[in-house]
Image (spheres, rainbow, N blue to C red):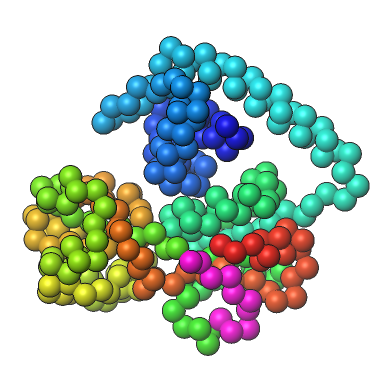
């Protein structure tokens, strides 16, 4: 048992949802489910009753929530008191994330950043434009995550690349893959692949994956793509982001292979001396 497991358990109990707990803690729903299952196995008890629509605490889960929430509160108070005795407080990590990559960055990076810098010491701002580096240039931001499509455009900055952009195959709810679990590259090559051909607002072709399929059909609008997928006419691949799929009868299936077509990276000023940033740069993300 570790503090992260306890934090995930408490948040899921409060929200009655693994998905909403994941969103608030900037991690994936799969991570929340996995770590809570590990906690249940370690304790030898079932903490949640799970249904397709919600989760709720079992009787022993309610007791665990009561005891662990009290202990967590006492621990946070103790940490706050100890910080007051610090000779030099660690400066905050001022983090900007372009909203178009928020889900991918949250899932892949923030959970690792929080192992080096306390969440309380991170100032997080969602940036509206993909190339808005004004705060970075003015020294008001330490790290800015965005799409990296044009390397020359960003060569004046330091660059922290992401290794994992976490993609999912999006298929109709009637598709056989729904019950398959993880799909392979060989599976993907047998299907009709659909993608958008042009930039559409903040959703453009640069966030959709180009990969071999049995056939590639281009459309100019992501909603056309999802409507076709909904009718069980092919599939598409998107960064992990459930919000886009709420209005369609489609589902996300985990990929069993790595897709690196989407390039996301954190930009920073090369002369930035923030020790919190240096700790992040010393860690491989």
Q: Is residue 83 shown left or right of residue 25? A: right
Give residue 97's position: percent from left, percent from top: 53, 61
Magenta run includes residue 161: yes
Give residue 157's position: percent from left, percent from top: 63, 78
Who's the residue at 79% across and 52% down the image? Answer: 90
Give residue 173's position: percent from left, percent from top: 15, 47
Who's the residue at 19% across and 58% down the image? Answer: 226
Eyeballing the image, is 232 above or below 45?
Answer: below
Q: Is residue 246 shown left or right of residue 156? A: left
Q: Nearer the viewer, residue 198 or 174?
A: 174
Q: Is residue 176 shown left or right of residue 120? A: left
Give the number of marks: 0
Give residue 181's position: percent from left, percent from top: 24, 48
Eyeballing the image, is 100 above or below 22?
Answer: below
Q: Nearer the viewer, residue 59 or 1?
A: 1
- Residue reaching furthest to the bottom: 152
Q: Is residue 202 shown left or right of residue 160? A: left
Magenta run includes residue 49: no
Eyeballing the image, is 58 above or below 148?
Answer: above
Q: Quadrant of the N terminus?
A: top right
Who's the residue at 48% across and 66% down the image? Answer: 163
Does residue 146 appear in this view? Answer: no
Q: Which residues are magenta?
A: 154-163
Residue 225 sits in quarter: bottom left
Who's the residue at 45% across and 63% down the image? Answer: 164
Does residue 89 appear in this view? Answer: yes
Q: Quadrant of the C terminus?
A: bottom right
């Amino acid at each position: 048992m570790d503090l992260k497991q306890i934090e995930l358990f408490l948040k899921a109990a409060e929200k009655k949802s693994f998905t909403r707990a994941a969103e608030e803690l900037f991690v994936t729903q799969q991570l929340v489910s996995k770590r809570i299952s590990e906690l249940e196995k370690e304790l030898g008890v079932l903490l949640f009753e799970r249904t397709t629509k919600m989760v709720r605490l079992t009787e022993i889960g309610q007791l665990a929530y009561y005891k662990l929430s009290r202990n967590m509160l006492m621990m946070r108070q103790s940490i706050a008191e100890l910080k007051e005795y610090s000779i030099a407080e660690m400066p905050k990590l001022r983090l900007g994330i372009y909203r178009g990559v928020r889900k991918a960055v949250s899932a892949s990076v923030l959970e690792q950043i929080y192992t080096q810098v306390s969440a309380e010491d991170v100032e997080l701002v969602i940036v509206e434009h993909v190339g808005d580096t004004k705060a970075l240039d003015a020294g008001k931001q330490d790290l800015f995550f965005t799409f990296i499509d044009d390397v020359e455009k960003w060569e004046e900055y330091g660059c922290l690349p992401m290794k994992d952009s976490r993609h999912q195959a999006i298929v109709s709810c009637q598709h056989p893959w729904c019950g398959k679990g993880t799909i392979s590259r060989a599976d993907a090559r047998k299907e009709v692949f659909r993608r958008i051909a042009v930039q559409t607002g903040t959703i453009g072709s640069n966030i959709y994956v180009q990969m071999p399929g049995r056939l590639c059909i281009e459309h100019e609008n992501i909603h056309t793509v999802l409507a076709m997928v909904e009718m069980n006419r092919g599939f598409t691949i998107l960064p992990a982001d459930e919000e886009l799929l709420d209005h369609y009868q489609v589902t996300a299936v985990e990929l069993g292979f790595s897709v690196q077509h989407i390039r996301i990276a954190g930009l920073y000023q090369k002369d930035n001396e923030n020790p919190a940033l240096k700790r992040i740069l010393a860690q491989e993300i």
